Image (spheres, rainbow, N blue to C red):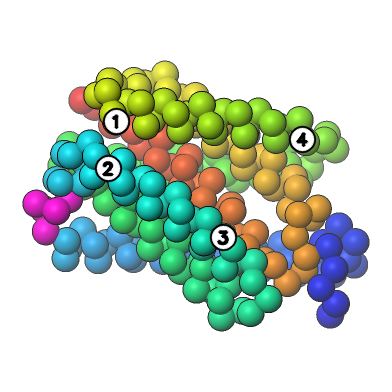
Amino acid sequence: MTNVLVAHSSDVEKANFYKKTYLHVALSILAFIGVETVLLNVVPVELIAMMFGQKYTWLLIIGVFWLASILANKWSLSQSKSIQYLGLGFYILLEAVIFLPLIYIAVLQAGTVVIYQAAMLTIAMFAGISAVAFTSKRDFSFLRNIIIIGGFISLGLIVGGIIFGFNLGLWFSVLMVILASATILYQTSKLKDSYTTDQYVGASLQLFASIMLLFWYILRILMSRRS
């Protein structure tokens, strides 16, 4: 099979690409759950508390996460399959580390039920958005600039909140859920135009990242309702 753009491939090749992409997304989520469970059981509580207790520590973690995410994404699009999987695995580990303090606080506040509820809502929203992207004949290219601008604004607000100590509040989480949903819609609609038939690992990483962003803010919204 030649590695051509998915949009220019045969129907069989397209179906195979989508099947592999979403299989890798599902496996990434399962791997994330496994790694997160291990971290919650082996990382000392004092270290977890330090992650969200010291603002500059959290700022450093976000900076490292951003740089490492770029590296992981680059690896996931490599010509080498082993390096592609290294990139995806590295990114899953990064997400598990970033989520560690949030999951820990969620379990303390409301137990595992709130995490389960957030996960079910995330999966339902992802499935619905994906269905819209695949069945709609609309061009969602206009979302690209909105996502980029929204991403920079939200990052600036997050960094500002960490440095100056202000709470972004419930409405920020709601807006981030909307931004994450728009990102999933755009990415899904552009899968065929952005990747070749052998780049399903890179495609799955992009979708996985957006799902995790959606899950993060849905979980924060549910937690705020219980606090």
Q: CA distance from mark 3 to mark 1?
A: 26 Å
The disc label shown at residue 162, or none: 1
Q: Secondary structure at mark 2?
A: helix
The quadrant in which the N terminus is found is bottom right
Q: Residue at x 77, y 35 (%)?
A: 140
Count neighbours of disc 1 (C-alpha within 10 A) and say few if under 14, some if 14 to 19, many if 20 or more: some
Which corner quadrant of the image does residue 17 belong to?
bottom right
- Residue 140, label in figure: 4
Predominant SS along the magenta part:
helix
Q: Residue at x 90, y 67 (%)?
A: 10
Q: Position of residue 108 (x, y in %)?
A: 15, 42
What amino acid is at disc 3? Asn
Task: Work out whether mark 3 precedes mark 1 in sequence or the reverse, and give the earlier one.
Answer: 3
Residue 46 at x, y percent in the picture: 9, 51
Residue 206: image location, x then y, percent:
59, 53
- Indicate which disc, 4 or 3, sits on the residue closer to the N terminus: 3
Residue 47 on the magenta segment: yes
Label 4 amino acid?
Answer: Phe
- For mark 3, does the 10 Å Cα neighbourhood hold few (<14), some (14 to 19), or many (20 or more) residues? many
